[in-house]
Amino acid sequence: MEKLRQCLLIAVGLAVLVLVVGLLIPGSGIAQTVKAALVANVDESGRVPYQFEGFLCIGTTFCDLTLPTVPAGKRLVVTFTSGSVSVAPQAGQLVFARLFSSTGSPGAVNLVTTFQGNSGGTDFYNWSQPVLAYFNAGVAPRVIVLTNQNMNGTFHVAGYLLDCSTAPCATVAP
């Protein structure tokens, strides 16, 4: 009888051990699954895409376009810009374009304009280039274009918004 009791206790002990181990191992897997589901990559560039397009100016020598202000808790990362300017032909024509911050913070990007040709008495200049520019919450990015004479122009910017309220955005080094 004593041997049966010992065997029964050992069997119950092993059953409890198997039960405890069985609960811990799948529980750990479930915990990892739940943890993975709660983690989000807030820095993913495709998460919150950004795009803006507009007319720079019509019939002036200095164009100044202010983009919408970056919302609170966000950071705008501009990754690409393009634009087009048309002017009357002139020797020594100047076409200067720049993307920068409305607050004058560092990170201004000069946009390289290229003469595309003449059609119907109008010279065409374009730019299309990858850039990397950061604009924090409360800042309105600006584009300026300067020419020797009246121009018409359009502008396009693309990038993405980072959510700085979910995870703090790192300081951008100068």
Image (cartoon, rainbow, N blue to C red):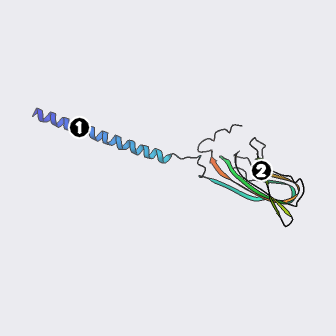
Point out the frontmost of discs 1 and 2.
2
| Left or right: residue 89 compared with residue 127 | right
- Judging by the rendered image, the residue that carries numbered circle 2 is 112
Q: Nearer the viewer, residue 109 or 8?
A: 109
Q: Nearer the viewer, residue 104 or 12?
A: 104
Question: Can you give x and y, in whole percent of width and height, for residue 58 in the image?
Answer: 84, 61
Q: Residues within 10 Å of mark 1 (few under 14, many from 20)?
A: few
Q: Amino acid at mark 1?
A: Leu
| Quadrant (top left, top right, bottom left, bottom right) of the C terminus | top right
Q: Residues within 10 Å of mark 2 (few under 14, many from 20)?
A: some
Say if residue 89 shows up in the picture: yes
| Left or right: residue 100 compared with residue 120 | left
- For mark 1, give the secondary structure: helix
Q: Amino acid at mark 2?
A: Val
| Quadrant (top left, top right, bottom left, bottom right) of the N terminus | top left
The extreme bottom residue here reads 120
User: Where residue 92 is drawn, which disc sits there?
Assistant: none
Q: Residue at x 39, y 44 (%)?
A: 29
User: Where residue 14 is drawn, which disc sits there?
Assistant: 1
The extreme left residue here reads 1
| Left or right: residue 19 compared with residue 103 | left
Question: Can you give x and y, in whole percent of width and height, for residue 120 in the image?
Answer: 85, 67
Question: Can you give x and y, in whole percent of width and height, for residue 103 in the image?
Answer: 78, 44
45 in relation to 10, above or below: below
Say if residue 71 shows up in the picture: no
